[in-house]
Amino acid sequence: MAGEISIYGVFFPLIQLQGIVALVFFFLMRKAMVRTGVYQWVWHPALFDIAFYCVLLFIVFKLTHFLK
């Protein structure tokens, strides 16, 4: 199927792998934003984190479908 990837015979949904990739990018970007002081300008860090992760997941999703 188009929505699954087989890794050594184990099928994973594509969105799960995309979510993991987005999570790695999120942690790297979050670390950089904390060091540069971006979080001083954020009103609610938890809401910002969720929104930022959703944006990264959308970008990864669009890039993987663009590369197909």
Image (cartoon, helix red, strand yellow):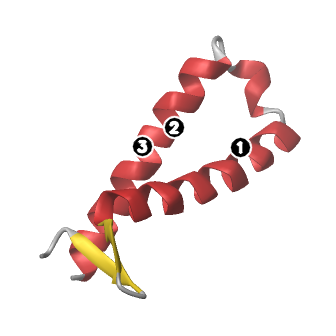
Which amino acid does the dot numbered 2 rest on?
Phe
**Which numbered circle lies on residue 3?**
none
Mark 1 and mark 2 in contact? Answer it, CB < 8 Å: yes
Q: Which residue is drawn at 79% across and 21% down?
A: 40
Which amino acid does the dot numbered 3 rest on?
Val
- Place residue 39 in its image quadrant: top right
Q: Is residue 12 left or right of residue 51?
A: left
Mark 3, Cα crowd under 10 Å, few <14 / some 14-19 / many 20+, is some
Residue 59 vertical position relative to residue 6 in the rendered view, above or below: above
Mark 1, Cα crowd under 10 Å, few <14 / some 14-19 / many 20+, is some
Question: Looking at the rendering, in which quadrant would you find the N terminus?
Answer: bottom left
Residue 49 vertical position relative to residue 47 in the rendered view, above or below: below
Judged from this view, the residue extending furthest toward the left is: 1
Q: Which residue is drawn at 66% across and 20% down?
A: 45
Residue 56 at what x, y percent from top left?
A: 46, 50
Q: What element carries label 1?
A: helix
Q: Nearer the viewer, residue 19 or 7?
A: 7
- Place residue 17 in its image quadrant: bottom left
CA gap between label 1 and label 2 equals 9 Å
Which amino acid does the dot numbered 1 rest on?
Arg
Mark 2 — residue? 52
CA gap between label 1 and label 3 equals 13 Å
Judged from this view, the residue extending furthest toward the top is: 43
Q: Which of 34 and 68 is in front in this view?
A: 68
Residue 48 vertical position relative to residue 65 in the rendered view, above or below: above
Q: Which residue is drawn at 41% across and 50% down?
A: 57
Residue 10 vertical position relative to residue 18 in the rendered view, above or below: below
Q: Residue at x 42, y 88 (%)?
A: 8
Mark 3 — residue? 55
Q: Which of marks 1 and 3 is nearer the N terminus?
A: 1
Mark 3 and mark 2 in contact? Answer it, CB < 8 Å: yes
